[in-house]
């Protein structure tokens, strides 16, 4: 019997629909090879939903997500909807909140064959391999907002529980990796950061003293990501800091187009999306890089469906394609999104996962 998995796809805006097709092609190739069937349901989010339904997160979309075993999202946003009453981004933020996806996991790994694409010199980036745990449903993204003609404010709130649950994940992940957590805050200025530091320190002492813990300020971390990116194993941080640092981190390997992410919660379906965003300037031209989306599909298989071999096969196929010289425009090459996808799919048909991928345990 073929195992069936219900996947909801939210293509969204800009290059979102193009990379969603790529992710789906990768999943279908996995299905063929490993005798699994992925059944897709597509729903509206972001600007596409505003155009079609007048709101960025229609109820039907939430329902389609709740029915799924896992959700893939392309991207949301674009200049077309700027200044409008509803913003496309509200759809994504609303979905994260509604589904309780409090942990955003962003792995960062450098491919040897792409080191020359990195803005940093080889000796700084060779062997970089870390993962960021970004808190995703708290902080200034979701605090009270106020606005009048003279003044605006976004309040930043964190509760002990919100800090604890993501901290557990980061420590558990570190245990399965190289055993180090860097907790990033701004404890010299912000009260929420002082609470953050206290909670992380306490959980470390209570349950994770075998893991090495260091606290770092966010400004200094922004510098260390450039000066010594190899020094990081697991980075744990709050919502806004994680948003900023993960864009910085994503270019170490040469292009933000390669970076995948997983947004996970307590139990329901997770949301898997490339980090790159909607890239409206190159949308619809078949030139974007599908790798961030395809690697997000791999994270879906690993965390959402618990199919480690299948996930590692996608990762091995991407690595093989890169080694063989496949390059999209952002990597200085000429392949379009579709051609790059086809190249990776061909590799999925025969790739053998070589490197032992890091298995994460959510204790
Ligand atoms: C991200 C994005 C989102 C965020 C936007 C699109 C709301 O930048 O996932 O990093 O700020 O979280
Ligand atoms: Mg961002």
Image (tube, grey):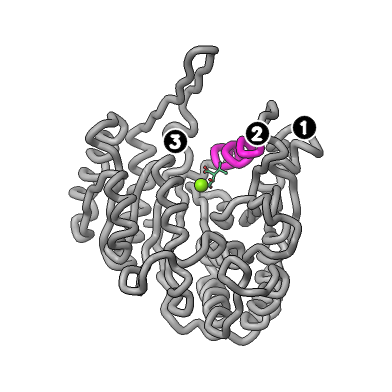
Q: Is residue 168 magenta?
A: no
Q: Position of residue 139 (x, y in %)?
A: 42, 34
Q: Mark 3 or mark 1: which comes first in sequence?
A: 1
Instruction: Tell me the number on the disc at residue 276.
Output: none
**How far is mark 2 from mark 3, CA to CA?**
19 Å
Q: Residue at x 61, y 79 (%)?
A: 326
Q: Residues in magenta? A: 87-98
Give whichever of 345, 110 is nearer the camera.
110
Q: Is residue 139 left or right of residue 190?
A: right
Examine the rendering and report whether any part of residue 272 can be seen. no
Lower sequence index among marks 2 and 3: 2
The label nearer to you, 2 versus 3, is: 2
**Residue shown at the point (49%, 48%) measured from the top left:** 265
In the picture as drawn, the residue positioned furthest to the top comes out as 149
- Secondary structure at numbered mark 3: loop
Which numbered circle lies on residue 54? 1
Q: In this orientation, which residue lies closer to the viewer: 257 or 207?
A: 257
Q: Is residue 198 above or below residue 211?
A: above
For marks 2 and 1, the one nearer the N-term is 1
Using the image, determine if residue 16 lies above or below residue 314: above
Identify the residue position indicated by label 3 in the image.
138
Q: Are marks 2 and 3 in contact (CB under 8 Å)?
A: no
Image height check: is 230 above or below 167?
below
Q: CA distance from mark 3 to mark 1?
A: 26 Å
Query: Quadrant of the rendered structure where residue 53 is?
Result: top right
What percent of the width, then of the height, locates residue 65? 66, 47
């Amino acid at each position: 019997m073929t195992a069936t998995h219900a996947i909801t796809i939210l293509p969204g805006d800009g290059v979102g629909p193009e990379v969603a097709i790529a992710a789906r092609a990768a999943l279908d190739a996995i299905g063929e090879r490993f005798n699994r069937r992925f059944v897709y349901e597509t729903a509206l989010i972001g600007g596409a939903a505003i155009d079609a339904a007048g709101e960025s997160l229609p109820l039907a979309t939430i329902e389609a997500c709740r029915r799924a075993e896992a959700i893939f999202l392309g991207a949301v946003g674009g200049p077309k909807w700027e200044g409008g009453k509803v913003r496309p981004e509200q759809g994504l933020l609303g979905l994260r909140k509604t589904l309780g996806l409090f942990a955003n996991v962003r792995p960062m790994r450098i491919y040897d064959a792409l080191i020359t694409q990195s803005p940093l010199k080889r000796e700084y980036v060779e062997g970089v391999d870390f993962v960021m745990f970004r808190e995703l449903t708290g902080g200034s993204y979701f605090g009270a907002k106020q606005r009048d003609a003279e003044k605006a404010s976004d309040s930043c709130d964190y509760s002990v529980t919100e800090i604890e649950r993501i901290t557990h994940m980061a420590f558990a992940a570190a245990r399965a990796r190289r055993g180090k957590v860097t907790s990033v805050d701004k404890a010299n200025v912000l009260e929420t950061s002082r609470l953050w530091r206290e909670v992380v320190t306490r959980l470390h002492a209570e349950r994770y003293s075998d893991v090495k813990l260091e606290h770092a300020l966010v400004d200094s971390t922004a510098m260390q990501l450039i000066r010594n990116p190899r020094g990081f194993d697991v980075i744990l941080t709050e919502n806004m800091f994680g948003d900023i640092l993960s864009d910085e981190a994503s270019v170490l390997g040469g292009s933000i187009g390669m970076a995948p992410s997983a947004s996970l919660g307590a139990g329901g379906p997770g949301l898997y999306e490339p980090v790159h965003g909607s890239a409206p300037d190159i949308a619809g031209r078949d030139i974007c890089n599908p790798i961030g989306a395809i690697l997000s599909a791999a994270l879906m298989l690993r965390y959402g469906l618990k199919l480690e071999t299948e996930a590692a096969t996608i990762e091995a196929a991407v690595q093989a394609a890169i080694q063989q010289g496949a390059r999209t425009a952002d990597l200085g090459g000429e392949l379009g999104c579709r051609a790059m996808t086809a190249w990776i799919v061909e590799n999925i048909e025969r790739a053998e996962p070589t490197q032992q991928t890091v298995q994460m345990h959510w204790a």
